[in-house]
Image (spheres, rainbow, N blue to C red):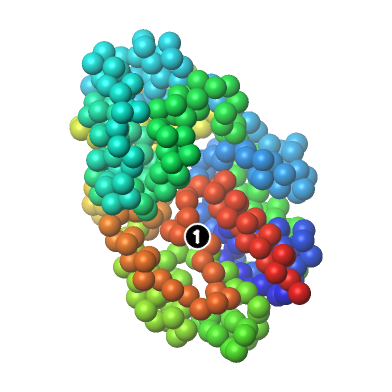
Amino acid sequence: MRVGIVGAGITGLTLTHALAERGVDSVTYEASDEAGGVIDTRVVDGHVLEVGPQRLRLTDQLEAMVDSLDLRDDLVEADDSLPLYVYADGKLRVVPRSLSAFLRTDLFSWSAKLRVFAEPLTDDAKPDETVAELFTRKFGREAYKNLVEPILGGTFGSNPAEMPVKHSLEGVMKLEQRRGNLLVPAAKRLLGPGESPPPASFDDGLQALPQAIADAHDDRIRLEAPVDAIREAGEEVVVETADGEVEHFDEVVVTTPAGETANLLEETAPESADALRDLTYNPLVLVHLVSDVDASGFGYQVRRDEPLRTLGVSWNASLFDRDGVYTAFFGGMDDAEILEKDETEIGQIAVEEFERVMDADAEVLHVEKMPSAFPAYDTSWSALDDVDLPEGIHLATNYTARMGIPSRVREANSLAKQFAEERP
């Protein structure tokens, strides 16, 4: 068994690590000169900034990988009981995480609270309904508008009214099928101690994880080795690099964004390549701010009808003692125009809106534009139904499965286990 891996982001790196642990031969190709993909930590004026995911959830699989890479001493765990806020009607309002907090919260009216408890009487989720339709029907308009829409919409940078459930919330559908409703498992997750893995990072930022994997397996990873094409060759799969190198594998796993993947598969699966090119990605702008404000919590998401362009702000200063650092997010499906503004103007918007919400001064540390940051999970993703790849070629990506570091690690480990079991 010999496995080729295209892309040294966290999915490709985890697969590399998991195959090495199982004694399966592999080669990982990365076009850039650095491993990590969207996980990108930088130091600006002495401040640790995440230009990508702001944190991870320390699942069992991630914890095992951290220990196998001797990163335990560098691990920083945040307090999962810290509050998360939604900015609504000109005020930060706490997202309730207990029954008593739910009853006390001013995020919902009393009629909206009572409507939430009627969820078990509603019909099951339908794959073709939108996220907005599902949660409005399940929990009521006010709960959707004040909680679900800003949390999910802000996280995905998408309008939930444009996101079909089958593409963005497959896990929710499966959860409902197992439990019979969504209210009970949602309440258990909120009210039950220790239900969620803790949020975590590392002393020097998240990039410590992919860098440790790359260092541990540098004999398997080829940096500055862009792949030009992937094609069938009998029972094997051929990977051809830009410098003309050709290698044969039993299995090839592609972890790159949809557009790049389409180019690689043009020769061997042209119809699938065309389908992948139809997928929509959302733009994102990150503005890293520094402020002396004494704020404790995860941060806040902004309700969509507020007169702000900010989608949300992560309070890394509070979570990981990041010396006054706050990360503000802009863009998304409904505000792609912000990419056209220069960084100075974007920074001014970020500061003004942060000061309006937090009532505290802030300064800009860094502005990062990401024209194609992450999948939109909108109606364009129906094109995935037309993706049919030859045997031996696999996709392991955030557009064929879930986003987030734990999901990427889980998918990579699953593939590694499959390949190891199939080994002659």
The residue under the point 45% across, 64% down is 257
- 75 vs 269: above or below: above
Q: Would residue 132 be found to the left or right of residue 402 on screen?
A: left
Q: How many marks?
A: 1
x, y percent for residue 397: 50, 60
Q: Would residue 161 be found to the left or right of residue 230 on screen?
A: left
Residue 259 sits in quarter: bottom left
The residue under the point 33% across, 42% down is 125
Query: 424 or 270, which is in the foreground?
Result: 424
Which element is circle 1 on? loop
Query: 290 or 213, which is in the foreground?
Result: 213
Tell me the residue that label 1 is attached to. 397
Residue 242 visible in the current orientation: no
The residue under the point 50% across, 27% down is 189
Query: 210 or 194, which is in the foreground?
Result: 194
Q: Would residue 184 be found to the left or right of residue 249 on screen?
A: left
x, y percent for residue 22: 77, 61
x, y percent for residue 168: 38, 49
x, y percent for residue 374: 40, 54
Residue 119 sits in quarter: top left
Residue 22 visible in the current orientation: yes
Packing grade of label 1 (10 A; few <14, some 14-19, many >=20) is many
The residue under the point 43% across, 58% down is 399
Q: Quadrant of the N terminus?
A: bottom right
**Residue type indicated by callout 1:** Thr
Q: Quadrant of the C terminus?
A: bottom right
